[in-house]
Amino acid sequence: MSLVCEQCNGDGYIVEDVEVCPESGSFCGSVHICDCQQEIEVTGIDPAELLMELHNNTTSPDTWACNLTAKHRDITVEEAQEFLDETMKVIESTSDICFFPDYVFGRPIKAILKKGEDGRVYLCNAASYDRDSSPGNSLRIVNKLKGGSS
């Protein structure tokens, strides 16, 4: 079973109708966010491990607020768990959302960990994480944690 999306080949984006612009010589076409980037199944992955990997695979924007809260290093799974423990106290009343960190220690996460009606757990809004990290990065991280190729 392949862990890489067949539509986008794990890049997170689908490019259609690509052609070379005669004036500039650059490529143009339609770029769409792949459906795999809207919800990525992460059932069985430890939320603290996932948050640690998401944090450690992106960088802090060079803003005053981000620099103030940034650790300026990768975090450990224990630090990610402490962050989740504090976050869960705030959103306990929302039963289907496991975490929704906008920024973690100065780094943009923007993704939501959510339990679906089917009982599975999904990383939602992954495209927002990828926008600040790199295209397809969230899917590569999940595949790595599932034991697939990165």
Image (spheres, grey):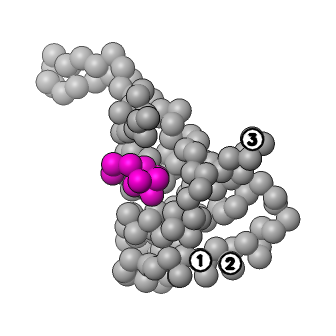
Circle 1 residue = 81
- CB within 8 Å, label 2 to label 3: no
Dot 1 amino acid type: Gln
Q: Which residues are magenta?
A: 142-150
21 left or right of 101? Answer: left
Circle 2 residue = 85
Dot 3 amino acid type: Asp
Marks 2 and 1 sit apart, C-alpha to C-alpha, by 6 Å
Q: How many marks?
A: 3
Dot 2 amino acid type: Asp
How packed mark 2 is, by other alpha carbons closer than 10 Å (few <14, some 14-19, many 20 or more), is few
76 left or right of 73? Answer: right
Q: Is residue 112 visible?
A: no
- Of helix, strand and loop, which one carries label 3? loop
- Is residue 105 rendered magenta in the image? no
Relative image position of residue 14 (x, y in whole percent) = 39, 28
- Residue at the image point whose x is 78% and y is 42% from the top: 117
- Residue at the image point whose x is 51% and y is 63% from the top: 50
How packed mark 1 is, by other alpha carbons closer than 10 Å (few <14, some 14-19, many 20 or more), is some
Relative image position of residue 44 (x, y in whole percent) = 59, 56
- CB within 8 Å, label 2 to label 1: yes
Marks 2 and 3 sit apart, C-alpha to C-alpha, by 25 Å
Circle 3 residue = 118
Q: Is residue 127 above or below residue 15?
A: below
